[in-house]
Amino acid sequence: MMNAKTDETIVRLEDVHLSFGQTEVLKGIDLTVNKGNAVSIIGPSGSGKSTILRCINALVAPQRGRITVDGTRVDQLAKESERIALRKRIGIVFQQYNLFPHLSVLDNIVLAPTRILGVERREAEKLARELLDKVRLSEKAGAYPGQLSGGQQQRVAIARALAMKPELVLFDEVTSALDPETVGEVLWVIRDLIRDGMTSILVTHEMRFAEEISDIVVFTENGRIVDQGSPEQIFHTFDNPRIRQFVGGLAGGRGPVREGI
């Protein structure tokens, strides 16, 4: 599940184009992610950020271009069974938690490994409890989603994604539906996972967080990647007026994430 940073590519998008009807959403996306790296995708709403993640996970299919995930040509997957096999290797955490309300926290995490991977219940529970400890919710194993705050539910959703032992985890604006007071607890968990070497791609509006944890920051607008580089380059060095305007407009979200939040 965790990887040391390497030069080995795990995700590559080449000239990816996608339209919904007459609306062009992606207009030639090129992106490379190496194992062990954290890549943050930033940019205004409607710029194609979340669609990039959905293409990587085969939730939508581009009309043109190549998408490769650890040797698998995602754009050529024709059968649903092939797409399901891909998704076993890629975790994704959405803005909405999508937990089963009638299942306990523990059962929400155990369900996919036992049903999809065929893991024995005892082994799945052991891993689930380890993951709950990692996301700082070990005391909530028997609770139900309705008894948790939004931030706690999102942390359970992260643990559920990790329970499949994915090679890559995608985070799609996971804090945008949260109360401001609970955003920090979710970012803290993600930061710890990235520091452990988890390969991840994050779509986020949390500029300070993207600057702190990313190896690469990608700025998108109007379905294109306008620029990409290190956090230092994107936030401080590159003289791109559009990026300067965007980042400056979100300056309240800048600065390092504080220890202990």
Image: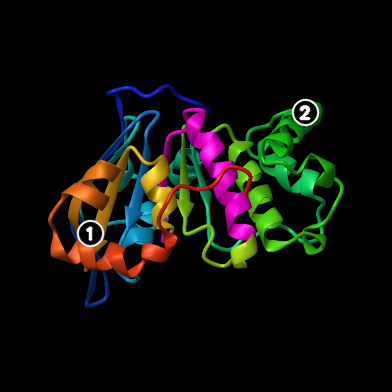
* Magenta-tinted stretch: 182-205
| Secondary element type, mark 2 | helix
Residue 183 part of the magenta-drawn span: yes
Give the x, y percent position of residue 125: 78, 33
Decide which of 34, 119 is in the foreground and name it. Answer: 34
Give the x, y percent position of residue 31: 23, 44
The answer to whether residue 242 is visible is yes
Decide which of 68, 173 is in the foreground and name it. Answer: 173
Does 119 appear above or below 135?
above
The answer to which quarter of the image holds residue 252 is bottom left
Mark 1 or 2, closer to the camera = 2
Q: Crowding at label 1, few (<14), some or many (≥20) Cα neighbours within 10 Å?
A: few
Q: Which residue is mark 2?
A: 126
Q: Which three-letter amino acid code belongs to the residue tagged 1? A: Gln
- The residue under the point 41% across, 61% down is 205
Identify the mark at residue 190; answer none if there is no mark. Answer: none
Which colouring convention does the figure follow? rainbow
Real-space CA distance between mark 1 and mark 2, rounded to the nearest whole angstrom? 43 Å
Q: Residue farthest to the bottom?
A: 22
Residue 199 part of the magenta-drawn span: yes
Q: Which residue is mark 1?
A: 63
In the image: residue 52, left or right of residue 256 = left
The answer to which quarter of the image holds residue 214 is top left
The answer to whether residue 31 is visible is no
Give the x, y percent position of residue 212: 41, 43
- The residue under the point 47% across, 28% down is 197
- The residue under the point 15% across, 51% down is 238
Q: Which three-letter amino acid code belongs to the residue tagged 2? A: Lys
